């Protein structure tokens, strides 16, 4: 009791100030219509602002969750695509019901870092070995355009070698006639790449679509690489420049493609051709 009296005595001036301030505000807003109305308006504005901010944050979180769901739905739809399955049916062709197993797995990932100003650019994604990612997995954009291939994997992250890397090379095809060529990048422009080893008699025109050939063990056939913009004869072959479909300056979300039968395919091909990739 003595301590309480001493505490009140010590802070009596402050307690008196708080008491009379509260009483004054009460009388002001209780009896003054103008002040009461101003207080209510200010309160409404403040609470409205808080509700708006809360709603915006909630909408953002819901949108982020929906985007994640859409990436997963896209992956599942691609996995159900017939081109993602390897036909194991050895019955006569008249049999309608066939047995197939999933050959390609699609896993959504986010780009968390990238370089575009070097001869050997790289992309870092937020999926690693714990998510099933492996070295040599293919990487495409959400718009089904070629991005590159996985070159290094840690537990939670992966490093991707994109087309815009001087070390990148891949067999590709002209979509309209399936003529194969070799995709490379000369380092001059991240919007363009080059296709070599296509014969000079090949029917190719500006605007033709270049796709993955499917001969590689890490990508299915038909992923769009780009579109022909320039054709220059060079002896018995054509030097072709293409505009890449993937825009590396805006790349945010990707899909990692794993071939369940890659090891088996590479082993049997290596027996006949040690240089096969």
Image: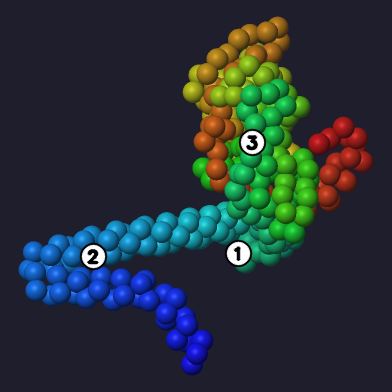
Q: Which residue is mark 3?
A: 114
**Drawn side of residue 181 relative to residue 10, left or right:** right
Which label number is shown at residue 26? none
Residue 182 position in % (x across, y down): 71, 25
Q: Which residue is mark 2?
A: 43
Mark 2 or mark 3, which has the lower sequence index? Answer: 2
Q: Which residue is mark 1?
A: 96
Give the spatial CA distance, label 1 vs label 2.
Answer: 71 Å
Residue 78 position in % (x across, y down): 57, 54
What residue is drawn where x is 72% and y is 46%? 158
Please say which color scheme the image uses.
rainbow
What residue is drawn where x is 63% and y is 8%? 233
Determine the image quadrant of residue 120.
top right
Q: Is residue 213 visible?
A: no
What residue is drawn where x is 64% and y is 40%? 113
**Drawn side of residue 177 relative to residue 132, left or right:** left
Dot 2 crowding, Cα within 10 Å, few <14, some 14–19, many 20+: few
Front residue (pair 88, 132): 132
Give the spatial CA distance, label 1 vs label 3.
Answer: 47 Å
Residue 226 position in % (x across, y down): 56, 29
* Front of the two marks 2 and 3: 2
What residue is drawn where x is 56% and y is 46%? 253
**Is disc 1 placed on a helix, strand or loop?**
loop
Dot 1 crowding, Cα within 10 Å, few <14, some 14–19, many 20+: few
Q: Is residue 188 visible?
A: yes
168 up-or-down from 62: above or below: above
**Drawn side of residue 15 relative to residue 33, left or right:** right
Residue at the limit of the structure toward the bottom, as seen here: 1
* Front of the two marks 1 and 2: 2
Front residue (pair 147, 66): 66
Give the spatial CA distance, label 2 vs label 3.
Answer: 47 Å
Q: Are marks 2 and 3 in contact (CB under 8 Å)?
A: no
């Amino acid at each position: 009791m003595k301590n309480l009296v001493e505490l009140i005595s010590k802070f009596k001036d402050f307690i008196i100030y708080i008491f009379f301030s509260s009483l004054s505000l009460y009388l002001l807003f209780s009896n003054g219509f103008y002040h009461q109305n101003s207080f209510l308006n200010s309160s409404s504005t403040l609470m409205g602002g808080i509700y708006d901010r809360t709603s915006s944050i909630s909408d953002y979180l819901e949108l982020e969750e929906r985007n994640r769901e859409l990436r997963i739905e896209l992956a599942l739809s691609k996995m159900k695509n017939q081109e993602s399955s390897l036909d194991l049916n050895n019955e006569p062709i008249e049999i309608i019901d066939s047995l197939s197993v999933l050959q390609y797995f699609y896993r959504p990932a986010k780009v968390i870092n990238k370089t575009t100003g070097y001869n050997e650019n790289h992309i870092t994604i937020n999926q690693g070995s714990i998510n099933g990612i492996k070295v040599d997995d293919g990487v495409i954009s959400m718009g089904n355009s070629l991005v590159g291939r996985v070159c290094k994997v840690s537990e939670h992250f992966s490093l991707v070698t994109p087309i815009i890397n001087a070390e990148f090379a891949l067999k590709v095809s002209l979509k309209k006639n399936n003529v194969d060529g070799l995709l490379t990048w000369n380092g001059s422009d991240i919007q363009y790449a080059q296709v070599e080893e296509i014969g000079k008699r090949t029917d190719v025109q500006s605007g033709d679509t270049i796709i993955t050939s499917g001969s590689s063990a890490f990508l299915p056939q038909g992923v769009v690489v780009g579109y022909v913009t320039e054709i220059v004869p060079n002896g018995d072959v054509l030097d072709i420049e293409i505009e890449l479909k993937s825009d590396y300056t805006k790349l945010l979300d990707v899909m990692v493609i794993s071939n369940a039968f890659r090891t088996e395919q590479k082993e049997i091909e290596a027996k006949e051709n040690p240089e096969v990739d």
